[in-house]
Amino acid sequence: MADKVYVDNVEATAAWNTVLFDRFSEYRHIFVTALRRFGDDALAGDPPNAGDRILDVGCGFGDTSRQLALIAGPDSHVTGIDAAERFIAAAVEEAEADAAENVAFRVADVQTEPLGGPYDYAFARMGTMFFANPVAAMRNVRKSLRPGGRLVMVVWRRKLDNEWMYRSEQVVDRHVPKPDAEASEALTCGPGPFSMANADTTGDILKAAGFDTISFRRIDIDMLVGGDPEEAVAVALALGPAAETVRLAGDDAERVRPLIERDLLALAGEYRTASGEVVAPASAWVVGARAPA
Ligand SMILES: C[S@@+](CC[C@H](N)C(=O)[O-])C[C@H]1O[C@@H](n2cnc3c(N)ncnc32)[C@H](O)[C@@H]1O
């Protein structure tokens, strides 16, 4: 939310540890399926080397941490870091069930806490857009890399090219007056998912954090946003900009929820495929950078 100043990550971490964890878990089959398409593309283009020591930034459930360990092989080691304890608890449990031996997880705020290392390769799939101070956070990541170590991160491109999130936010904005994020009791996730969408700004953040050899590669996909229109509506109201407005607006949004849901259902109809699934254009950057050699 633009009208809120984030001095640290306490509120965003609390959000990821509570409401956002619950919603991400409930619709994991949608979110992670979509994110996997972007992550796989990023890893195919710029994979870690065999035996690399790897950092997975904002690792969530740790599925990319396990994937990185498989790609880099048995001599590699992956450390997945996330600020939210509940994500790390789930990641540890899933890695144990998977008998993934060369993967470890740690709770830490990437902006302020030691990250271990030195790492050869740092990866993030939608895990770097929520820092109150992105330069400090990315500098911490850069410092954890060995000289010449690589960063590969996937971040959303601009909203306009992520049609389901963009247009569902427009629907909500038509019905709900802009909430006052400072006054609302609801937890926000900091600067938010689109905070690294602008390549100029993100390039400058990385430069200020001490990275060089910065590159951007655009990935466009048709993204599944719901198994059917009703699920697409639920997804829009679970995570992302439309959901955040509804949460912050509280009763003002609840009063008009039937209207919001009606209009979102009509919107979902525009993206309904022959099989009944809802699929919309989506777009992300794969950002590459290097710690100076
Ligand atoms: C959109 S989720 C992505 C999770 C995972 N990378 C994936 O692709 O499924 C963003 C993740 O970043 C984590 N995160 C947010 N702020 C963080 C911070 N300051 N330090 C570490 N992790 C953070 C959240 O807890 C959450 O798990």
Image: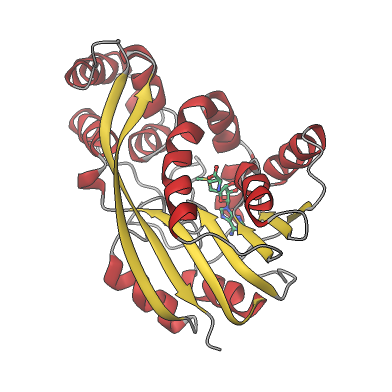
Q: Position of residue 126 (x, y in %)?
A: 47, 51
- Considering depth in this image, is 246 or 211 the residue closer to the camera? 211
- Answer whether residue 111 is visible to the viewer in this image: no
- Answer whether residue 47 is visible to the viewer in this image: yes
Q: What's the residue at 41%, 46% (across, down)?
A: 38
Q: What's the residue at 58%, 62% (across, down)?
A: 48
Q: What's the residue at 51%, 62% (across, down)?
A: 131
- Which quarter shows the C terminus? bottom right
Q: Is residue 155 above or below residue 171?
A: below
**Quick check: 178 left or right of 243?**
left
- Considering depth in this image, is 149 or 244 the residue closer to the camera? 149
Q: What's the residue at 68%, 45% (across, down)?
A: 66
**Quick check: 94 left or right of 210?**
right
Q: Is residue 114 above or below residue 236?
A: below
Q: Position of residue 251 (x, y in %)?
A: 39, 26
Q: Number of labelled discs?
A: 0
